Structures are given as C-alpha cells and as structure tokens.
C-alpha cells in the first residue's frame, strides 16, 4: 500500500481540528480508515500488461528511445503514475510519467535515454502505482519488462573517412597516382623518366621497343590486417577527456573501415591476460558492424597484460604474413619487461605497427614555469617524454613502426601510417 500526496495534505488540514481539541487518535484513525478504504477500492496493478519496443542500439553520446505499452485488461479506468527505472549511466528520463488508461485500451509511454557509458544497458523494473477513487491510497507493484540497449563506440573519427578513402583511391590508381615498389601487383608499362627506380626497368620490353620501359605497380589487395587492442591496466588511463581504450577503439574502427575498402581482410583481437573480444573472417559489408558490436562491451581490466600470451595468440591466428597493429600505451615498464623480449617473434613473421595515444597533459606540464611546483612538473614531464622517445627508438630498431599521436588526431595518424606502409609495399 502507498500513501499519496493528497493524504499528506489531508493530514495537514486535520491539524486544525486537533488544535481545537478534537482527539488526535480519533482524527488519525479516521484518516487511516479512509486511506485503507481507498487502497481497497483501487484497481489491481496485476491487471495491467507491460511490454517494450524501441531502439536496441545507439552510439555513445547519442539519444535513444524505448517505449512502454501499458494495456489495461481490467474493466476499470485506472489512474496513477509509472516509473521506468534504469541505471544512472543510461541517462533515462522522465523519472515518472502519469498513467491514464481506460478499460480495454492501451497507452504508450516513451522513455528517453542518453547513455554516458559504452556497453549493454538493461532496465531494472517498471513500478506502477494506481490511485483509489479518493486519491488518498494507492496500490503499487512492479512489472518485469526486459530489454537491452547496446551502446556502441562513438566512432568520432569517421569524419576522416572521406579523406582517407580519397588517399586510398589515389594510391590504388583510380584518380592520379600509380605507386611503384617492391611487394606490389604489376599494373602496366610506361616510358622511363628521370627519378624512376632502375629496378623497375623491364629489360624485355625495352629490347622490343626503342625506349626504356619501366613497370608500374599498384597496391596489393587481399592483405591481412590484425588489430590488437590492449585491454590491460594501461588502457584505463585517461588521455584528455576519455580513457585510452576509447581512443584505441576509435582508431581501430577507422583503420578497419579504410583497410576493408582497400580490399584487405581485417580481424580484431582484444586481450590482456585472456581474450576479451575478437572478430575474424568478416566480409567487407559486415566488418564495421561486427567491429562496433565486439568493441561495445570492452572495458579496461586492471591487470598487467601478458604479452607472451598475446604474441602467442597473434601467431596462432595469423599464419600468413600480416600487418599486426598493436594499440597499446608506450609505457616503459610494461613494454620493456613484457613486449620487447617477445617482439622478435612477431617482426620475423609480420609487419608490426605499434600505435599509442599521447597524453596532452604531459605537453602542458612540460611548458610549466614560474612556481616551484610547475618546474617540478615540467621536469617530470620531460623525463616521461624522454622515456617514451627512447622506448619508441628501441622498438624501431627492432623493425616496429611506431605511432605516437595526441587524442583527436590519433585515429587519423594511424590510418595514414597504414596507407604509407601500403604505398611502400610493406604489407
């Protein structure tokens, strides 16, 4: 049983006769009797049927709507309020909604959601409170109405997609450029011009003609790209306004979209000590949706990444030569002790690109002067930057291409690095 605001107002009004000498117990008993009678006369909540429809997926930061259809199976007109409860990160509103359903009819109430976290959002329960004819007492019960809203990554870097595809078309020879180099597919013959690599000269074609002829090449297709997302403790660090993992997810989506348009096969592996998510064998048309769905549920795990196990899993999944993109942090302790001893096994069989998003706060601290605390902060930032640079140099000496870019530009720089490797015929 629930007591309405009208009953509270009536209790306040009864304070007047109580002040004039009317016994308080008599007034309280009368009020309780009225509330109990009103509760007894109120419609039964279990006569209502509640079902859900609406959106099942949305991007982080974008709104969604879930509708509740309330059917009155009783022969009485029901009045009351309904609360559709969600966890706070779902951003559900309004908190309560008025309910007015004639007998045998149905009303549809809409809950607006604005999620603030990735992953699956589930409602708790639907609580219904139906008033009695006097509006003093009410029956209250809850209904189960299961639903799932999958909140996907924002994919903010999709604004760069037209630019990257334009570069890809130029690289592929559809607009202006034809690239030449080792490890690419033969395209055509043309006359030699100053600056051409002498290794591109086709001596047989030259012997048949009066001019020196060179081969032109186009980027190979059907290469393999494996995106490896580090979900260990370093992925939980915040860079700018978002966790490092979210920036890595954004870069993975952009690179996956570009590589699939280039005709390459793209797989994904998210791992720390265990596999947290994977995508394998997706076609070009379904790749992006599968990547989005697989990464929506990823969260940083507060454990140290087992790079030996990661490398072993990569080698098991990629037996053909591939581009392996490691999306992790240039953390000196974690990579020197974990990845560097194992990186040789990767570079001997695959082309390796390590991409790390930089922290803009480090650059801000490095410029600090004036106060003593600012000078200490600048010294710490300079030491951190030097450590990252030394680690990047060690990785490059071992044959790894290293990308270190700030958030906002990170995804674009990673995609450009892929295109540069493709242009050089290193895939």
Image (cartoon, grey):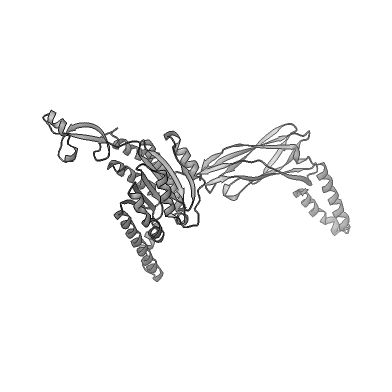
Place of residue 377 in the rendered image (x, y in percent of width and height, measured from the top left): 39, 66
Q: Quadrant of residue 426?
A: top left
Q: Is residue 389 left or right of residue 283?
A: left
Q: Quadrant of residue 46?
A: top right
Q: Quadrant of residue 263?
A: top left
Which residue is located at x 45 percent, y 40 percent?
Answer: 280
Q: Residue furthest left?
A: 210
- Camera-side residue of 276 and 160: 276
- Camera-side residue of 108 and 281: 281
Q: Is residue 49 left or right of residue 288?
A: right
Res 408 visible: no
Q: Quadrant location of the C terminus? A: top left
Place of residue 118 in the rendered image (x, y in percent of width and height, measured from the top left): 52, 47
The relative height of residue 61 versus residue 333 in the rendered view (above or below) is above
Q: Is residue 131 left or right of residue 195?
A: right
Place of residue 384 in the rendered image (x, y in percent of width and height, measured from the top left): 37, 62
Res 152 visible: yes
The mark total stands at 0
- Camera-side residue of 292 and 100: 292
Which residue is located at x 36 percent, y 67 percent?
Answer: 379
Place of residue 215 in the rendered image (x, y in percent of width and height, measured from the top left): 20, 34
Which residue is located at x 36 percent, y 50 percent?
Answer: 346
Q: Residue furthest top?
A: 208
């Amino acid at each position: 049983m629930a007591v309405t605001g009208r009953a509270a107002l009536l209790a306040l009004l009864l304070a007047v006769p109580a002040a004039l000498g009317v016994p308080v117990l008599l007034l309280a008993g009368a009020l309780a009797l009225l509330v109990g009678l009103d509760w007894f006369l109120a419609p039964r909540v279990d006569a209502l049927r509640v079902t859900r429809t609406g959106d099942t997926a949305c991007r982080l930061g974008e709104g969604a709507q879930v509708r509740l259809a309330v059917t009155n199976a009783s022969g009485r007109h029901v009045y009351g309020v309904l609360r559709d409860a969600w966890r706070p990160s779902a951003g559900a509103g309004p908190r309560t909604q008025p309910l007015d359903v004639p007998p045998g009819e149905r009303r549809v109430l809409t809950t607006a959601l604005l999620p603030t976290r990735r992953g699956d959002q589930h409602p708790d329960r639907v609580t219904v409170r139906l008033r009695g004819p006097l509006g003093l007492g009410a029956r209250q019960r809850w209904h189960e109405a299961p639903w799932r809203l999958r909140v996907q990554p924002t994919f903010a870097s999709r604004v760069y997609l037209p630019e990257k595809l334009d570069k890809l078309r130029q690289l592929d020879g559809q607009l202006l450029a034809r690239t030449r180099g080792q490890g690419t597919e033969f395209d055509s013959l043309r006359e030699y011009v100053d600056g051409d690599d002498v290794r591109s000269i086709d001596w047989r074609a030259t012997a048949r003609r009066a001019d020196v002829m060179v081969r032109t090449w186009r980027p190979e297709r059907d290469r393999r790209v494996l995106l490896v997302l580090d979900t260990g403790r370093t992925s939980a660090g915040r860079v700018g306004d978002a966790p490092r993992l979210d920036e890595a997810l954004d870069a993975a989506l952009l690179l996956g979209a570009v590589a699939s348009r280039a005709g390459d096969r793209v797989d994904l592996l998210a791992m720390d000590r265990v596999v947290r998510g994977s995508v394998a064998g997706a076609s070009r048309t379904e790749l992006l949706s599968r990547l989005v769905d697989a990464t929506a549920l990823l969260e940083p795990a507060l454990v140290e990444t087992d790079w030996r196990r990661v490398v072993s899993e990569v080698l098991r999944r990629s037996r053909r030569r591939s581009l392996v993109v490691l999306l992790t942090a240039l953390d000196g302790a974690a990579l020197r002790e974990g990845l560097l001893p194992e990186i040789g096994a990767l570079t001997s069989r695959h082309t390796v690109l390590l991409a790390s998003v930089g922290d803009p706060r480090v650059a801000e601290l490095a410029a600090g002067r004036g106060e003593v605390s600012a000078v200490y902060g600048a010294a710490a930032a300079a030491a951190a930057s030097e450590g990252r640079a030394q680690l990047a140099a060690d990785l490059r000496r071992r044959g790894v291409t290293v990308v270190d870019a700030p958030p906002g530009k990170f995804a674009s720089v990673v995609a450009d690095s892929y295109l540069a490797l493709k242009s050089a015929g290193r895939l």
